[in-house]
Amino acid sequence: MMDGYLNIALPKGRLGEKVYSAFEAAGFECPSIKENNRKLIFENPDKKVRYFWVKPSDVAIYVERGAADVGVAGKDILLEYEPDVYELADLKTGICRMCVAAKNDFRDRPSKTLRVATKFSNIAKKYYASTGRDIDIIHLNGSIEIAPILDLSDVIVDIVETGTTLRENDLKVIEEIVPISARLICNKSSFRFKSAQIEKIAENIKVN
Amino acid sequence: MGSLNTEKMVSELCSLFSRYGYDQFNMSKFEEYDLYARNKNFLVSDNIITFTDTNGKLMALKPDVTLSIAKNSRVKPGQTEKVYYYENVYRVSEGSGSFAEIPQLGVECIGDVGSYDILEVMKLAADSLSLLSSDYVLGICHLGIVSSVIESTGIGQGYYGDIYTAVSEKNAHALDALEESSGVSLDAVRFLIRSYGDPKTVISSLRSLSLSGCGDVLCEIEEITSVLEESGHEGKIVLDFSEINDFKYYNGFVFRGYISGIMSGVLSGGQYDQLLLRLGKKDASSIGFAVYLDSLQRLAENDAGYDVDTLLVYEEGTPAGVVCRACAELLKKSESVRAVRTVPDKAVARKTVRIDKCGRII
């Protein structure tokens, strides 16, 4: 939208609300966003800023395609979908790890093709390619933890925060792939034409 | 109306290239598959439509034009081949995920490329942008500077790929992990990531780094960017080292053109001597760029909110000659007229005019 507004895509949920407070503190407030309603788009004509709530895994698409100039997405999404965007800052929030997990009694046999259940097929492929291991990827969309329990897979590749979900399902982390956190991303073309505003956000945004 | 405007843009761009003495390059639809198999990294994707020709050879429907032009070029000292092309290529479309015929427009200068040739191609890129819009930016990078900065840190070559990625993403914080694992300071790379914007300012701050072997390159960048700004592109030229593209094929200048309102680069190009070397053309140099016509279509679509300027509705039984004369009359004042007997479900017109059987407006 070419109306001089800065368009910001926020992930729906706890992370998005935390991140909005940081944008507010950086001088990009939009009070109407705090109204308790089901609206998804909020504008502040004084600050010429527009926010929208988006499914977390979709933020990168909005930014890559320019529907949003700027957005906040987890590094897991960026590594999985590899959108062509600038990654301007690590907000150091939403911290977790991308890990390989398996049943507590899992014993790896390196000569076997490892069955890996995951939502993050690209990340899993790249990780195991770097170790030279042959794998069979089973792409699932949710409740990945039950896959090894039902012998659908040998291991899973998934995000781990506290590790509670794994423990409660008698699973453990066997390898850590990469640390994950929320990142500030921006559209490459928007950066050319709105660099002053985008730089101001990148320099001032600090999440508590 | 959208495709008509794209054709008009293409025609204006081709005219621009011809005026600078570039010949139109025509090519056949097919190329031996082997050419693409050996140069997969140069292509956007390795999905290629292939078929076996009557002589048993594996052929491909062309996914790219540059490789064919480069393959067929002949190098003579002091001479260059200057061509432009407007051809269809066959690639997987990002939107649909399946193969599509995609029009591509571009310029190539191959042979013994000199400093004026480099300036000329970059000027054609900037001139192309200004033909398409008044709100544009040409972002320029020089890979010689990027590689000098990385080498100056002394970090092991194994880290180069990750550093290039960090620079292309403006991802300064990714350097923290690389510093930790290599034990080498990457402050110079952080400096590079932060160095973008007005060419004069960026060049003067890069000079303060005193990079070895970069004096001549910085002078070349200075000359080219100042000539570009003086030739009608003041304030539109930006130095930005994130415009790396693919460092395995490109060397020297790499650039990307942006138009406000279009989500991604509208044109991109650079010097690709390394590709020529891979094709066995020793002592050859090259520079060129491609225009992304599918993104230009978005520009054409922005113009009008209607399919046709005037909808002319005539009654059943109206003589053909009456309708014809009414159209001709309306075309004196309208951009386009569509004559119909009933108002169509979907067409949107700026205005609707109805006539009776005698041609009088009712």
Image (spheres, grey):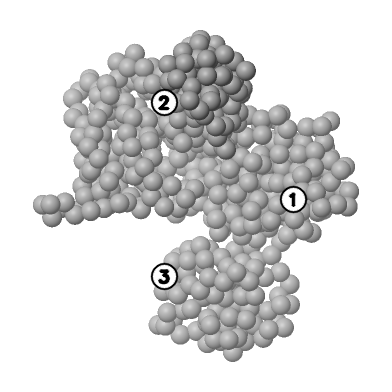
> Where's residue A166, x and y in %?
68, 79
Quadrant where the N terminus of chain A is found in the figure: top right
Q: Nearer the viewer, mark 2 or mark 1?
A: 2
- The subunit letter for the residue under badge 3 reads A
Residue kind at label 1, given as amino acid type:
Trp
**Which label number is shown at residue B7?**
2
Distance from disc 3 to disc 2, alpha carbons, whole Å, reads 50 Å
Q: Which residue in the protein does label 3 denote?
A: A132
Q: Secondary structure at mark 1?
A: strand
Q: Earlier in the sequence, mark 1 or mark 3?
A: 1
**Which label number is shown at residue B257?**
none
Q: Which residue in the protein does label 1 denote?
A: A53
Residue kind at label 2, given as amino acid type:
Glu
**Residue at image coords 36%, 29%:** B106
**In the depicted structure, whether residue A189 falls above or below residue A80:** above
- Give the crowd class for mark 2: few <14, some 14-19, many >=20 residues within 10 Å: some
> Where's residue B294, x and y in %?
46, 36
* Lateral position of residue B317 relative to residue B60, left or right: right
- The subunit letter for the residue under badge 2 reads B
**Residue at image coords 51%, 74%:** A138
- Give the crowd class for mark 1: few <14, some 14-19, many >=20 residues within 10 Å: some
**Residue at image coords 35%, 52%:** B46
Q: Nearer the viewer, residue B82 or B361?
A: B361
- Give the farthest residue toward the left: B55
Please indicate, yes or no, whether residue B141 appears anywhere in the rendered image. Answer: no
* Lateral position of residue A156 relative to residue A128, left or right: right
* Lateral position of residue A127 relative to residue B58, left or right: right
